[in-house]
């Protein structure tokens, strides 16, 4: 989230400083799940292994600790997995497996190997996703917003869903994941417990789905678009999604210039084109080459650093994404 905010701030800064030469580019990018499951796992079941909780009330908004609703969260998680289209089949087990009442401690009831074997056979699946707990913590905070004289009261809702991944051939869970993220509300608009738990269920489903299935995420890049005819023509190609055409124009421009700022800009753009075409190693080479022509403290250096940060992140993700998409006979490059 912090990286995303930094990117947006940099894009705004470039927008004011260089209205013509630097152009932003936003697109949806497929990102890998946190957990890489075996390729033969095609059908999965979501089971509600959460302890029972009292009926949430519409007339109460609680500060402090709450427990999420197992039924709502399991249904939302199963729906999120189905929407991802990563698994051939997603089944939800309607029956709650845990009849204990929720408490303030962090106790989690593990499934026995016998339970896992029975459930996978009865449901006809390869793997179980056991929703074990959803911890919710509402904390009052005061934040300072620009332009306000006094701090503004808000409520931060920290959400921690806990998911155990079971295989019928293993004694213990393959993995236990517990992502943490938060929602926030103005204090006077904090929802009731009943409404809050519905938000928490959907939010938990979103967090957990990203743990086990690849997902699409909006991402940002920038490129140089002005200064000469080739740059402007290449920008038209970018707007039309013709990355091969843009790359050819930038490559021609790079070859014509002996040294200097334009050559560096062309090399930075060539790195972006290579990335968009799935050639990450080639993109890295172009960025390394561009560095020779980037002056310290220059606009080109800002763009180079931003591009290098984004490419490094993508190169870390790519091997995992390649493995996870292998089940579809993916055509991901390098």
Image (cartoon, rainbow, N blue to C red):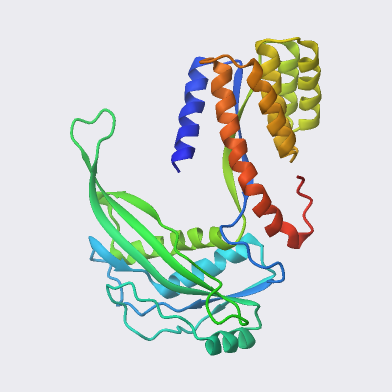
Residue 101, quarter of the rendered image: bottom left
Q: Residue at x 50, y 33 (%)?
A: 7
The residue nearer to you, when weighing 125 against 164, is: 164
Quick check: can you spot residue 103?
yes
Residue 276 in view of the camera: no
Q: Where is the C terminus found, in terms of image quarters?
A: top right
Q: Which residue is depicted at the point 66% across and 62% down?
A: 85
Which corner quadrant of the image does residue 236 belong to? Answer: top right
Establish if 158 lies above or below 275. below
From the viewer's perspective, is 101 left or right of 276?
left
In the rendered image, residue 237, in percent from the top left (x then y), is placed at 75, 26
The image position of residue 127, as x and y in percent, is 61, 76
Residue 281: x and y in percent read: 72, 37
Instruction: Please state, as top left, top right, bottom left or bottom right, where the N terminus lies in the image.
Output: top left
Q: Residue at x 35, y 76 (%)?
A: 107
Q: Percent x, y for residue 162?
A: 44, 68
Q: Number of numbered discs present?
A: 0
Residue 197 against residue 4 in the figure, above or below: below
């Amino acid at each position: 989230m912090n990286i995303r905010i930094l990117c947006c701030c940099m894009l705004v800064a470039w927008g004011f400083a260089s209205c013509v030469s630097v152009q932003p580019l936003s697109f949806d990018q497929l990102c890998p799940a946190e957990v890489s499951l075996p390729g033969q796992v095609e059908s999965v079941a979501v089971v509600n292994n959460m302890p029972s909780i009292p009926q949430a009330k519409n007339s109460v908004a609680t500060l402090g600790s709450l427990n999420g609703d197992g039924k709502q969260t399991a249904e939302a998680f199963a729906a999120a997995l189905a929407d991802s289209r990563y698994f051939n089949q997603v089944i939800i087990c309607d029956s709650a497996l845990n009849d204990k009442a929720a408490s303030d401690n962090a106790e989690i009831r593990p499934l026995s190997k016998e339970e896992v074997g029975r459930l996978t056979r009865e449901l006809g699946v390869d793997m179980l996703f056991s929703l074990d707990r959803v911890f919710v913590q509402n904390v009052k905070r005061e934040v300072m917003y620009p332009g306000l004289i006094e701090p503004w009261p808000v409520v931060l809702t920290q959400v921690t869903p806990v998911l155990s991944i079971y295989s019928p051939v293993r004694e213990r869970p393959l993995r236990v994941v517990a992502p943490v993220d938060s929602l926030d509300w103005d204090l006077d608009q904090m929802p009731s417990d009943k409404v809050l738990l519905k938000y928490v269920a959907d939010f938990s489903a979103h967090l957990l789905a990203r743990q086990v299935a690849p997902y699409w995420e909006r991402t940002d890049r920038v490129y140089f678009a002005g200064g000469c005819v080739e740059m402007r023509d290449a920008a038209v190609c970018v707007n039309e999604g013709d990355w091969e055409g843009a790359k050819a124009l930038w490559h021609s421009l790079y070859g014509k210039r002996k040294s200097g700022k334009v050559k560096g800009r062309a090399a930075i753009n060539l790195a972006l084109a290579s990335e968009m075409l799935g050639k990450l190693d080639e993109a890295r080479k172009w960025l390394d080459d561009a560095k020779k022509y980037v002056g310290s403290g220059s606009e080109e250096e800002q763009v180079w650093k931003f591009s290098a940060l984004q490419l490094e992140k993508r190169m870390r993700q790519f091997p995992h994404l390649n493995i996870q998409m292998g089940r579809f006979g993916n055509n991901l490059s390098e």
